[in-house]
Amino acid sequence: MFGSIFDIYYKTLDAIFMPIIKVLHPALAILIIAIIVSLIINIATKLLVDQKRVAELKKEIQEFQVKFKKMSKNPEMMEKLQEEQQRIMQLNAELMKMSFRPMIYTWVPIILIFIYLRHVYGFGGVYQELNPGWNGVVVYLPIILSKILFIDFWHWLGSIFYKGGFKIVSNTALGWLGWYILCSFATSTVLRKILGIK
C-alpha cells in the first residue's frame, strides 16, 4: 500500500522537477528546489505569524537583556529585576509558541522533499541511473569553508548512521543532503529579509 502511495508521490514530483533534474547539474537543481521550499515555508510563516507582535516581543526581550547585563553586578538592582524576569520568561514562551505555529504546517512537506531528494540523488537513485559513473558528490567546497562548516565531523556522523552507498571521496565534498541544508539555510535567510519576517 505504502509502496503504491510513494510511487504516485514520486511520479507527481518527477513530472514537476525531472525536467530540471535531467538538464541541470545536481548543485543547481537542488538549489532551485531549496528556493521553492524555502519560499513556501517563509510565505506560510508570514501568513501564520503576527510579525508586528514578534517584533514587539523581540524588542522587549532584547531591552531586558541589555538592562540585565548592566545590572548584573549590582545585587540590589538584580532583586528588582526578578519580577520583570518572570514576565520576560512568559514573553519568551509566547515567542516560541508563535515560531512553532508554521512548523505544524511545514514539517510534513519538508520531510517529503527529503524523501524525494533521496529518491533522486541517493545511492542507486534516479540521477545515478541516468549517470552511472556519478559518485554522489554534488559540490566540492573550498577547504576553508569545509573547515568552518565542520564537514569532517558531518562525514563522520553520516558514516555511523548511513552504511553502504556512496563513499566519501574528499573532505571538501558534499552530497545531496549537505548541499540541500546549506542552500536551504542561505535561501531562507535571504527570503526572510525580503519578506520582512522578524
Image (cartoon, rainbow, N blue to C red):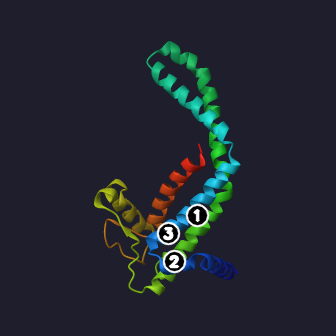
How far apart, in angstroms, are the residues tagged by discs 3 and 1?
10 Å
Secondary structure of residue under mark 2: helix
- From the top left corner, tell me how far across and down residue 112 is, in percent: 61, 68
Indicate left or right for 70 with 10 as reference.
left
- From the top left corner, tell me how far across and down residue 151 is, in percent: 36, 61
* On-image quarter of the C terminus: top right
How far apart, in angstroms, are the residues tagged by discs 2 and 1?
14 Å
User: What amino acid is found at the position of numbered circle 2 in the picture?
Assistant: Ile
Quarter where residue 152 is shown: bottom left
Please report the residue visible at 46 percent of the width from the left and 79 percent of the height from the top.
123
Secondary structure of residue under mark 3: helix
Please report the residue visible at 70 percent of the width from the left and 49 percent of the height from the top.
48
User: What amino acid is found at the position of numbered circle 3 in the picture?
Assistant: Ile
> Which residue matches tag 3?
30
Secondary structure of residue under mark 1: helix
Answer with mark 2 or mark 1, whichever residue precedes in sequence: 2
Tags 3 and 2 touching, CB below 8 Å: no
Work out whether 198 lies above or below 37: above
Residue 36's disc is: 1
Tags 3 and 1 touching, CB below 8 Å: no
Q: Looking at the picture, tell me which residue is in the foreground, 160 or 8.
A: 8
* On-image quarter of the N terminus: bottom right
> Which residue matches tag 2?
21
